Amino acid sequence: MVDTLLLTTTLLVLVFSYFHHAYKYWEKRKVPFLQPKFPYGNSPKLVTKSATFGLENIKYYEEVKKRGLKFGGIYTITRPVLVVIDPDYIRDILSKVSITRLNQSKIIN
């Protein structure tokens, strides 16, 4: 009984620590970001399937734009995602990123 409780507690602490560390990604890089909520990040509706990927991306885009930012960070669960608003930044990113890297990323117009 005590072993199970200790194992469960240790596992919960490790999971919470992982999420806490993952949610510091944008802060460490001094990028403005939408505050994530444990354990869904910024996408609780995607996890619960109550919204589509496209609608959620529109919501992120509009929230970052409403704050007057040229770009901002979000989290899909623990994965950091950059939302770029400024067309000049988008052009610079797309002209400098290799084709191989583009194939590994999700780019949404």
Image (cartoon, helix red, strand yellow):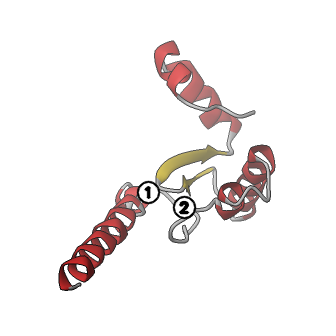
Q: Which residue is farthest left?
A: 3
Mark pair 1, 2: CA separation? 7 Å
The quadrant of the rendering that contains the C terminus is top right
Q: Residue at x 73, y 48 (%)?
A: 57
Q: Which sits earlier in the primary sequence, circle 1 or circle 2?
A: 1
Residue 78, x across and y down, in percent: 47, 55
Residue at 79%, 55% in the rendered image: 51
- Which amino acid type is shown beneath numbered disc 2? Phe
- Badge 1 is on which residue? 26
53 left or right of 43? right
Residue carrying label 2: 33
Image coordinates of residue 6 in percent, x first then y, are 21, 80
Q: Which mark is residue 14?
A: none
Which residue is located at x 51 percent, y 67 percent?
39
Q: Tell me the SS state at disc 1.
A: helix
Residue 25: x and y, percent?
Answer: 39, 56
Q: Which amino acid is tagged 1? A: Trp
- Residue located farthest toward the top when viewing the structure as drawn: 99
Q: Residue furthest front?
A: 1
Mark 1 and mark 2 residues within 8 Å of each other at the beta carbon: yes
**Secondary element type, mark 2:** loop
In the image, residue 104 lies at what x, y percent?
51, 25
